[in-house]
Image (cartoon, rainbow, N blue to C red):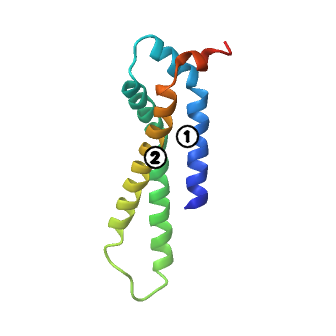
Amino acid sequence: MIITSMGMIGFINDEIQRKSKEIAIRKINGATAREVVELLCSNMLKTAVPAVAIGTLAAWFFQRAWFSQYSTVVSGIGLWYVAIALLIIIVVIAVVALMTQRIAKENPVTSLRNE
């Protein structure tokens, strides 16, 4: 989980740095920090939700194959998969919101200075 979290944070940081000029232009055109955060969260969820769904289904499939080797199997474990998937989505949203907030609140001139 730690390695996965580090990869996720690195990916999100790279995406936000790549979109920093877009954020600055949106702010110059009158967008609020909240609108920018909502936009990037929705964009990131378009990637995160399918990835989490595919990962959750793959984990469930392999768990069923693995548990079929045992005579006694724990029931109700499917709810844990849903809970963990929702927790991962919440963590992704929180990380994106916190990292975007930093760029959305800074002066747009600093992001556009290189242009």
Residue at image x 37%, y 25%? Answer: 35
Q: Which mark is residue 111?
A: none
Q: Are marks 1 and 2 in contact (CB under 8 Å)?
A: yes
**Which x, y percent locates residue 108?**
53, 18
* Label 2 Cα neighbours within 10 Å, binned few <14 / some 14-19 / many ≥20: many
Q: Is 9 situated above or below 40?
A: below
Residue toward you, 25 or 46: 25
Tell which residue pokes out farthest to the bottom in this image: 71
Residue toward you, 71 or 13: 13
- Please state which amino acid type lies under the numbered disc 2: Val
- Please state which amino acid type lies under the numbered disc 1: Ile
Q: Left or right of 76: which side holds 81?
A: right
Q: Is 7 situated above or below 28?
A: below
Tell which residue pokes out farthest to the right in this image: 114
Circle 1 sits on which residue?
Answer: 12
Q: Which mark is residue 92?
A: 2
**Which x, y percent locates residue 16?**
55, 32
> Quarter holding the C terminus?
top right
Q: Quarter-wise, where is residue 57 in the image?
A: bottom left
**Which x, y percent locates residue 66?**
51, 76
Residue at image x 42%, y 28%? Answer: 39
> Judging from the image, what secondary structure is the residue with disc 2 in?
helix
> Judging from the image, what secondary structure is the residue with disc 1 in?
helix
Residue toward you, 14 or 78: 14
Earlier along the polypeptide chain: callout 1 or callout 2? 1
* Label 1 Cα neighbours within 10 Å, binned few <14 / some 14-19 / many ≥20: some
Distance, label 1 to label 2, CA atoms, is 9 Å
Q: Is 77 situated above or below 10?
A: below
**Which x, y percent locates residue 79?**
32, 66
Residue at image x 57%, y 20%? Answer: 21
Residue at image x 49%, y 73%? Answer: 65
